[in-house]
Amino acid sequence: MFSPLTPLDWKRRAVKYYPEKIAVIDEEKKFTYKEFGERTDQLSIALHESGIRKGDHVAVMLPNTHYMLECFYGICQIGAVMVPLNYRLTSADLEYIINHSDAKMLIIDEEFSGLIEEIAGNLSFEEFVVVKVPGQKSSLKAVEYEQFLVQSDANTALPVVDIDENQMLTLNYTSGTTSKPKGVMLPHRSNYMNAANFLYHLNVKHDDVYLHTLPMFHANGWGGVWALTAAGATHVCLRKVDTSLILDLFESENISLLCGAPTIVNMLVNDPKAKEVQLKTELRMATAGSPPAAALIQKAQEILGLNMIHVYGLTETSPFILYCEWKKEFESKTKDEQASIKARQGIELAFNGETKVLNPEGVEVAWDGKEMGEIVTRGNVVMTGYYKDPQKTAEAIKNGWFYTGDLAVTYPDGYIEIQDRIKDLIISGGENISSTEIEGVLYKHPDVLEVAVIAVPHEKWGEIPKAIIVLHPGAKVTEAEIITYCRSIMAHFKAPKEVEFVESLPKTATGKLQKFRLREMYWNSSKKVN
């Protein structure tokens, strides 16, 4: 009678009840759920005939295309483990991850094959499957993806595999900003429970049309690769983040839901076409990855009419552990107050388990919005550990709790709000200064397009806050004016002491700011940002 909790079962359900419903739109290509199911089954058969068995690892390096979506189901439904790769990494990082993951095969988009050609001789396997891309050419000795699907007998049955909900489903690697990338082991159960949270809290419906702006390799698209299939909704693929194209798709495909980092939100609201978009349906957007400024949320709601949903999590937690639940009582507040509430990470989701904020003594902080501590969590969505790294696992999971490394406060209503990453907190002259608080103030300045605040060394104070700013085109504002502006809104000791204007800020593939790269320029050398 027992049925394991696995998101793979949702594909079976979708094919059963929605066979003629459009499952996937990828540019000019469209697949019904029946066709999508047939393609994923054929991939499973091809992998099995190539020797891939339950527990084997298959690396995948693809953008947000239907091929990537097919891999999540085709690889995992035969009990194998999918290893999604970040195609923005260096060849050296990819070599480390692929070999560390014990992958037996790589499925790769031809556009990224150059990165692998450099290291192919150093990998632990020689089997490649390549997705052909017009205008690209790979020198890898590989079988073409579509040929791979049809090389087996069409009458071959799908392998029957017993799935244990606690076995690994995906092996997702962290960015490795301070050390070697770590392999996060996520089982079927945690993916299922996280996707259930995605379904419930993002209000996913059968008629939703979901745009994959968020890289699917990032924490399995936050669970979107599973959740939309569960509802029989439509996946719209997006090979690259192009704000003009995204805005066009909002209209042409009647997009109703998407996810993305605050940087993506910022890009959308500042696109000249944003004010011209005519939405035919309510458009919901979940944002996470870094704390969004209240001013940015307000712009998204006013300019694009986006119903912003703030969520929070980490790769190690599948990833959702908090969301900003919207209550009817908030409707009577001003727009500024509403935006400030939506900037909070919020409360536990229904299916993830327990999350709270602990002070350095291990005691939960007061619910006063002032006492700061570290967010910890336990329950249904936490990883089983870091692959082949018991030491790092023990450092992250202590006494049954996963320690996130994020500093936060808890308000009287239980809503949690991040103040900073532990490594990003600025300690100047003994005072704790939140970089995100300064960023929130600067995002209200009409000339500021993007901003990152970091600590830089200072002879007297140890370190001071420095604002690194990208201005709107044509904007002219001075360092002194920015500092004066901040001091007019916040305590003087919190305001940035230095300001530098740059053309762009370093980001991850998901649009998250890479502050460590900015810090390195000031702490490890005399090099300045340019």
Image (cartoon, rainbow, N blue to C red):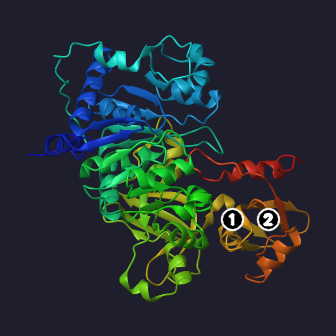
Residue on which disc 2 sits: 475
For disc 1, the marked residue is: 425
Is the residue marked by circle 1 packed among few (<14), some (14-19), or many (20+) residues within 10 Å?
A: many
Q: Residue furthest bottom?
A: 332
At horizontal 31% and vertical 38% (from top left) the residue drawn is 167
- On the question of residue 318 being in view, the answer is no
Q: Closest to the observer: 476 or 181? A: 476
Q: Residue at x 59, y 51 (%)?
A: 511
Q: Quadrant of the N terminus?
A: top left
Answer with the quarter of the image where residue 480 lies.
Answer: bottom right
Residue at the extreme top: 141
**Measuring 85% from the left and 74% from the top, which residue is drawn there?**
481
Q: Which sits in the foreground, 187 or 40?
A: 40
x, y percent for residue 436: 65, 67
Judge from the rendering whether residue 179 lies leftward or rightward of residue 123; answer left or right. right
Q: Between disc 1 and disc 2, whose residue precedes?
A: 1
Which amino acid, by three-letter code, is at mark 1?
Leu
Percent x, y for residue 315? 47, 49
Q: What secondary structure is found at the residue carrying circle 1?
A: loop
**Depth order, front residue of 65/71:** 65
- Please give left or right for residue 232 compared with residue 439 in the image: left
Q: Residue 495 in the image: state x and y as whole percent.
A: 78, 75
- Where 117 falls versus 499 (above or below)? above
Q: Amino acid at mark 2?
A: Ala
